[in-house]
Amino acid sequence: MKFIFVTGGVVSSLGKGIAVSSVGRLLKARGIKVNIAKIDPYLQIDAGTMSPYEHGEVFVTEDGGETDLDIGNYERFIDRNLTADNSITTGKIYWNVLKKERRGEYLGKTVQIIPHVTDEIKLHIRELGKGFDVTVVEIGGTVGDIESLPFLEAIRQMKKDEGKENILYIHLSLLPYLKTSGELKTKPTQHSVKELRSIGIQPDALICRTEVPITEKVKNKLSLFCDVEKNAIIEELNAESIYEVPLVFEKEGLGNLITEKLGFGNKTPDLKDWQDFTDRVLHPEKAITVSIVGKYAGMGDAYTSVVQALIHAGAENNVRVRINWIDSEKLETESYKEILDKLRNDGKLDGILVPGGFGKRGIEGKINAIRYARENNIPFLGLCLGLQCAVIEFARNVCNLKNANSTEFDEGTSYPVIDLMPEQKNVKNKGGSMRLGAYPAVLKEDTVVFSLYGKKIISERHRHRYEANPEFVPILQKNGLTISGTSPDGRLIEFIEITRHKFFVATQAHPEFKSRPNNPSPLFNGFVKKAAYRI
Ligand code: GLN
């Protein structure tokens, strides 16, 4: 088993997740079996209870893990499903240690950070390495944070435990560019490497984020002060698309450097598909604009997978999908029509997407946007809460069920078209208790959804508590709503559509989580195609 540990220095938000994902891609491109894990040094057991304001999107794995959004990047870059275990938090580690303590596994001992917590961390990392040639582990946060110390200590120890030929430390740092003097500054990087070395970790490679190319002089300086070989100083210039990063790293020689250092020798990478995909992302034939109507408008991180799924579908259809974020609260009054009419007249409303979400704020605006899409034949895709809002809209405005609502937003509504199912009614603890992870659905033949998936039984990931209420299915159907997919027992509504519409499809699932470069989500693909071409 071999491990690559990636730490970050100087500032946060350097794109460590993308760098780690790209390293994974370079290994995969060489036929090396790679796993990737993320360490988040916060005290939550998982990301499920965190607001997207705090940490961006909560990514859901096949097995129902509610993880950091970087797990989604890893999946997309190495094109493989990961598990809840690929996301390690301080909370998870301590939880395990405390459970062991209660079981009496440390009888007689004083339970301490070193060795008990560090041992637990190493145990978890080694478990993840089983069955893989290399496991890349991203250490969240920035070197110097108190929170990440036990993790850094654990990965330091692993060099001795596993043998130095099996461990590689990569440090990602920032070289700030001073415009006034036209210089790239190395001091912050020197300091963060110094900090790392004070913990006992000497980086084998430095990835330097920079706005301008790194000169020889700067490389020499970094090499000297950080004690890193010159060919192991990798330049990461700002890229136009995240999907370029593996190609940039490959050009910089990172792939060969890693494989040589870890004893795999020189392997020729196969990056052709990736290159083709990236070319299509960067140089599409035309552009369209899709409005995403959500509560966290403008916060791309809150909807990472949705944005990426649109990019994948765009590449497949040779179009650039521009996103116009609309804060759903802005569409809550009657003026929603004017706002959307204006966008439409300006040629900026090729489609409307309503993503997932929680809580009452902005709901009426989402419902209005859906009404507009339905009445004006604008392609519409609803995801999770997006389906729930579409059902509410249809119930109110087509079936005449006045004030129909979800009991999440109006407990006393006379028409609870969206409601908790019995198994959710007894749930007390909020953490990890939603309908989570992959569930199968059976599709109805002769529907748009069936034609997009091309098969009868499909599987998508879920993360929600509420469901379309089966009691109202007959009236919805009678008024022209097609139930295009249900759970295998027929009880839960998974997909809906309106047949006499250019494209009006919604799902209770989150298909964005399974979309990949060169393998877009069928629903996103259909949506983007309809938004882009009049076919
Ligand atoms: N709030 C809704 C529910 O819990 C929808 C959740 C979502 O969109 N992920 O069912």
Image: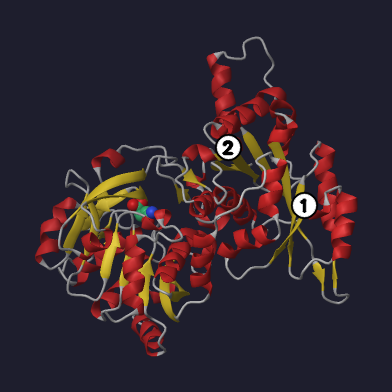
Q: Closest to the observer: 19 or 336?
A: 19
Could you tell whether 238 is left or right of 471 in the image? Answer: right
Number of numbered callouts drawn: 2
Q: Quadrant of the C terminus?
A: bottom left
In the image, residue 234 sits, relative to residue 28, either above or below, namely below
Q: Amino acid at mark 1?
A: Ala
Q: Which residue is mark 2?
A: 133
The image quadrant in which ligand 1 is located: bottom left
In the image, residue 370 sits, relative to residue 156, either above or below, namely below
Could you tell whether 3 is left or right of 369 in the image? Answer: right
Q: Quadrant of the N terminus?
A: top right
Can see residue 141?
A: yes
Could you tell whether 121 is left or right of 470 in the image? Answer: right
Q: Amino acid at mark 2?
A: Asp
| Colour theme | secondary structure
Can see residue 43?
A: no
Residue 102 image offset from top left, x and y in percent: 55, 17
Q: Which residue is mark 1?
A: 232
Q: Closest to the observer: 272 or 450?
A: 272
